[in-house]
Image: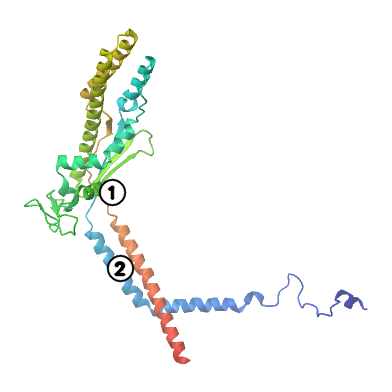
């Protein structure tokens, strides 16, 4: 057997190219020409449907401009709050439990973060319902169409509320009524108007903001919300302190042990101190670091962004329609030729 047959025992013809070698003009394969043809065809389709693209994009651009101009300006008034010493200090219930434990009394533990409690109450359904009823602001929440900048007056939606007769005239299906229920206006207030959050840059501070068509109303509501939550927490603590004093006085009258009497006197003194501080400090839970001002610039809507998004959406949709039309026409032509 020859040396060549020994290297190729199966008598197979040798490969025309060795490892790592490619035939001539390998990098000028036909698929690159196909890609070039496809790109030319793509631009040809776009050029053929240019009037469709221009027309659809123009319609979407005009519609987005009209829509953005129809949206009322929304103004945001905001204030920065800080917890007071009463809010940051140890809750009275916890102090009372600690002192009572020295006398062998088990009064339970009451660990309350007043700041967190006040924030939750401020956004609660019951507090907002009471706030709306107290200040009689339901039409300003549910029926405002826009704010007239020159006169400073609110313009109400006549299909919802008649401002001359103070009557609700909106047409709704049962079980809803013409006048919005507390479920409706509280949800609107929570979702679209009020925002309470902790400051992300400065721990411990709280931001409260109100969005409204009227910058004057937004400013007024921020101030009223801060005042009302301070009053609410004040009355809550005063009521709790008075109830605790009644309990302590009853317990004091039933014991003859001097050690227990001393503890009860200390607890009663703490209650009196709580009531006194609550009555003399207007900013009971939150003190205002940066008060709200009447905003002069709108916060929303972003009309330019709406127009840009609408125009781009029209452009993409027009390209899609042009390609679909070309595909349908091509398929019909193939069927006809067949």
Q: Check disc 2 and report the residue beneath it.
A: 60
Residue 321 x, y percent position in the rendering: 38, 75
Residue 317 x, y percent position in the rendering: 37, 70
Question: Is residue 317 or residue 195 the one in the foreground?
Answer: 195
Q: Is residue 50 left or right of residue 188?
A: right
| Image quarter in which the N terminus is found | bottom right
Q: Residues within 10 Å of mark 1 (few under 14, many from 20)?
A: few
Determine whether the residue tagged by mark 2 lies in a helix, strand or loop: helix
Is residue 155 visible to the viewer in this orientation of the structure?
yes
Question: Is residue 213 or residue 251 the one in the foreground?
Answer: 251
Give above or below for 336 relative to 90.
below
Among all residues in the image, which is located at the extreme right?
1
Q: State the image quarter where residue 216 is shown.
A: top left
User: Residue at position x 37%, y 76% from top?
Assistant: 50
Among all residues in the image, which is located at the extreme front?
254
Q: State the image quarter where residue 294 is shown.
A: top left
Q: Check disc 1 and report the residue beneath it.
A: 191
Give above or below for 64 relative to 222.
below
Is residue 293 visible to the viewer in this orientation of the structure?
no
Q: Is residue 22 left or right of residue 125?
A: right
Q: Is residue 168 left or right of residue 70?
A: left
């Amino acid at each position: 057997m020859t040396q060549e047959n020994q290297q190729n025992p199966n008598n197979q013809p040798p490969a025309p190219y060795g490892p790592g070698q490619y035939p001539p003009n390998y990098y000028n394969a036909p698929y690159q020409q196909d890609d070039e043809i496809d790109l030319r065809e793509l631009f040809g389709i776009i050029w053929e449907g240019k009037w469709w693209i221009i027309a659809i994009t123009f319609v979407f651009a005009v519609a987005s401009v009209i829509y953005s101009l129809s949206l009322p300006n929304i103004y945001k008034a905001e204030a920065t709050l800080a917890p007071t010493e009463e809010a940051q200090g140890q809750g009275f219930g916890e102090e009372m439990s600690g002192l009572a434990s020295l006398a062998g009394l088990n009064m339970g533990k009451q660990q309350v973060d007043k700041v967190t409690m006040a924030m939750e109450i401020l956004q609660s359904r019951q507090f907002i319902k009471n706030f709306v009823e107290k200040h009689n602001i339901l039409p300003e929440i549910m029926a405002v169409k826009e704010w007239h900048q020159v006169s400073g007056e609110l313009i109400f939606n006549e299909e919802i509320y008649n401002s001359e007769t103070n009557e609700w005239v909106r047409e709704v299906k049962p079980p809803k009524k013409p006048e919005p229920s507390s479920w409706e206006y509280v949800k609107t207030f929570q979702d679209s108007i009020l925002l309470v959050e902790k400051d992300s840059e400065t721990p411990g501070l709280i931001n409260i903001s109100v969005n409204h068509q009227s910058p004057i109303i937004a400013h007024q509501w921020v101030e009223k919300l801060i005042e009302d939550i301070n009053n609410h927490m004040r009355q809550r603590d005063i009521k709790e302190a008075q109830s605790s004093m009644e309990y302590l006085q009853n317990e004091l009258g039933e014991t003859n042990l001097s050690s227990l009497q001393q503890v009860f006197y200390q607890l009663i003194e703490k209650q009196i101190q709580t009531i006194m501080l609550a009555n003399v400090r207007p900013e009971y839970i939150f003190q205002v670091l940066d008060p709200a001002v009447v905003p002069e610039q709108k916060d929303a809507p972003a009309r330019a962004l709406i127009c840009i998004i609408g125009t781009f959406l029209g452009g993409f949709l027009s390209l899609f329609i042009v390609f679909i039309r070309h595909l349908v026409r091509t398929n019909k032509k193939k069927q006809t030729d067949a």
